[in-house]
Amino acid sequence: MFLAFQAANPDLSFSLIAPEAIVSVAGVIVMMVDAFSRRGQRWVTGVLSIIALIAAGIASLWLWAAAPLQRAAFNGMIVLDELRLSFTLIFVIVSILTVLIASVWIEGEKLPAGEFHSLLLFATCGMMLMASAGDLVIVFLGLEILSIATYVLAGFRHTDVRSNESSLKYFILGSFASAFLLYGIALIYGATATETLPGTTNIAAIAGRLDQSLYPPLLFAGVAMLIVGFGFKIATAPFHVWTPDVYEGAPTPVTAFMAAGPKAAGFASFMRVFLFGFPIATVAASTSGYAHQSWVGALAIMAVLTMTIGNVVAIVQNNVKRMLAYSSIAHAGYALVGFVAAGAASDPLERNSALTAVTFYLLTYAVMNMGAFGIVTLIARSGDRRNEVDDYNGIGFISPVLGFSLSIFLLSLLGIPLTAGFMGKIMVFSAALREGYVWLVVIAVLNTVVSAYYYLRLIIVMFFRERTEAWEPPRIPASVALALVLTIVGVFYLGLFPGRVINAFNSRPAISLSVR
Amino acid sequence: MIPQLSWYLALSAVLFTIGAVGVLIKRNVISMFMCIELMLNAVNLTFVAFSSFFRDVSGQLFVFIVMTVAAAEAAVGLGIIISIFRNRESLDVDDASVLKL
């Protein structure tokens, strides 16, 4: 059964890790170019990293098109399926938008551009590895590559106390969470041993061994530890307290990146580990059955807590970045609803469609979130000081471009029809309804109503409140304008014609690396 | 008496708990950082214990990866701590309260 993964000959396939390889090599090249280039030519690194990211995107599209005869490589360490490729594409989009949004900020603050871009590329490589991991080792490795780069990015404005603090908090709590995740992996490694075979960390092999486990209690402890570790990374409710502080203190383009990229990466490996490592069991009263029921139940409760806390606390925030941080917690809750549905689905086709719904949701969230943060970056200006809601008083009519585009993103985050946010919510909620989670969907919809308050409040502040002090609209540089155009087009494209993307994410029936 | 697998597991669980509690109650950043290292090393002990019990080398390979990652994390962590110390002259986390909770 799992002998395929223990084949003696190493099956190396470098074409299967092409996107990861391109991005990490580009990270090194960018660092070198930065070291040897003269001052004033620093924009080169931005261009280079965008080229590398586009190349990685093309590589992943190529992997998509080339009929995947080979579903796994490196002895099951790396897998190739639609889940991985769609997340890879999300990460590429997020990183390109981050480079575009960050360019002005780097210029304005006179920060070292090359370091920023190479760290961003390394973080992207880590995210891609997390999505493509077929083994818990690679999940951990990808998570750490991502996290270590992101700790530095959060503290990138190193003379600013807020940025220091954000980076410190992220570092302490992030490595705390990694330790939990790692302990979970160790316990599962021990618990998957059978009479004749040693333990394993291969996700597909774990699924086959649950019922033969010699030490089921270790298995349950391991599952709990994994939930804690991943829960921290994607900022779900009992483990979300670090999020607002870190998101507020980090430089705004980095916040945009953190809310969209690493969160999606956390979901990618969270879903892969739990849906394929601890799948629905044929016999409910068995070790695998109990493990499955307990994680689905725990995630359903976490989804409710996450949505409710995120939305309710967002109402009282007066800082726009903090408000968007709580909104990002709430959105993780909506995505968890779809995850729970995917976990509860007994039919593989339904599971795949729920999985597609969550992936699509994270794509829409990434697009609208990057757009909103792009505008927040422009309005905050140098020093990242103007982030209070009062700073947005009446800017809608002074700078209609910024006002209207921010309104579009906020309405999309709220989930108004015709926008991407609406489509994403519909897909996730209908997936949950199909699995009979009516109560969960009711709570989610009520939460959406609550969220209307704080999204609409910002729009009202922008358009219907008097501006008391003088305010000059910020110049919109070409790169940010490009990012805004891309995100607005994305919001409407995903909202009006989502079919093509959904089909691509879902296409072939085998999103499974389940053991046959 | 020959040490059993469960002894090692119990020891590493105790070490992990001490580390986790330490992160939560310590107020000095360096101490918190050392507690996190303690947690990682407790996990390493678990891996090595299982690995030698199963006579399987992959657990020990995992330990090498963890050690490498912990070293990278230490480098970045100390860098962050130095930059916060330069701006603030204090390593007490209670002073790090510009961003309210």
Image (cartoon, helix red, strand yellow):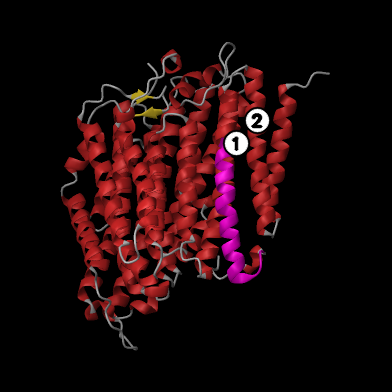
Q: Is any part of residue A401 visible from this angle?
A: yes
How crowded pointer 2 is (Cα within 10 Å; few <14, some 14-19, many 20+) is rated as: many
Residues drawn in magenta: B66-91
> Do the numbered discs 2 and 1 sit on residues whose CB atoms are within 8 Å?
yes
Is A352 displayed left or right of B48 in the figure?
Answer: left
Q: Which mark is residue A183?
A: 1
In the picture, the quarter occupied by the N terminus of chain A is top left
Three-letter code for the amino acid on which mark 2 is drawn: Thr
Looking at the rendered structure, the secondary structure element under dot 1 is: helix
Is A181 displayed left or right of A77 in the figure?
Answer: right
- Residue A58 in percent (x, y) is at 22, 40
Relative height, residue B4 to residue B99 (above, below): above
Q: Chain of mark 1?
A: A
**On the same chain: label 2 and label 1?**
no
Q: Chain of mark 2?
A: B
Q: Is any part of residue A1 visible from this angle?
A: no
Q: Which mark is residue B46?
A: 2
Q: Which mark is residue A233?
A: none
Is residue A125 or residue A292 the one in the foreground?
A: A125
How crowded pointer 1 is (Cα within 10 Å; few <14, some 14-19, many 20+) is rated as: many
Q: Residue at x 55, y 43 (%)?
A: A178
